[in-house]
Image: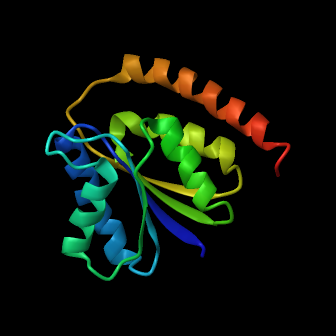
Amino acid sequence: MDTVIFILGSKELQILKSRLEKSLEIISNYPSSPIFVSGGTVLENGQVESAFMESWIHKRVPSVTIYQDNTSLDTVQNIIHFYRFFKNIQNIFLITSDFHMKRCLVCLKILFPNVNIISRPCNTSENRLMSENKAIIRDVTRIHHYKKKLKGFL
């Protein structure tokens, strides 16, 4: 397997749907690539993020292979669980919101330093730059801690 489509969840249904809409562009161009949907938060409609994403995609593209992580509650957990599934890949299509993209890219590059990461951000009207900068520092620290723990197992 050389290319995986990685879609991060959101507890906000409108943001989640915009990420899913963006994913259709990639899925149509890479229909044989597996898809990894990640998110364990229960949405306002009562569904877990990843289950909602899998169902939404399968209704539109029934033939794709989807791996589901239904336990991650934040960005770091999303990325760690993705890493556990796909250690030996060449390309990642990363789909998340524009305000969230930088943090995801920085964290992914720590665990996948030699992988080509193609970002596909969803445009939002949200301005979360200040809170995202703080979140980047927090999450990079957590990812580095996880990577140090892994060194004994790699």
Instruction: Give the residue drawn at x 78%, y 35%.
Output: 148
Which residue extends farthest left? Answer: 45
Q: Position of residue 115 (x, y in %)?
A: 65, 58
- In this rendering, the answer to whether 104 lies above or below 65 is above
Left or right relative to 146: residue 1: left
Instruction: Give the residue drawn at x 26%, y 41%.
Output: 42
Q: Position of residue 39 (x, y in %)?
A: 38, 46
Instruction: Give the residue drawn at x 22%, y 49%.
Output: 47
**Quarter of the image with the N terminus in it:** bottom right
Q: Quadrant of residue 100?
A: top left
Left or right relative to 52: residue 76: right
Count of numbered tags:
0
- In this rendering, the answer to whether 7 lies above or below 10 is below
Q: How did the renderer colour the structure? A: rainbow
- In this rendering, the answer to whether 103 lies above or below 137 is below
Front-most of residues 152 and 121:
152
Q: Position of residue 38 (x, y in %)?
A: 41, 51
Q: Quadrant of residue 61?
A: bottom left
Front-most of residues 58 and 110:
58
Which residue extends farthest right? Answer: 152
Q: Position of residue 82 (x, y in %)?
A: 54, 53
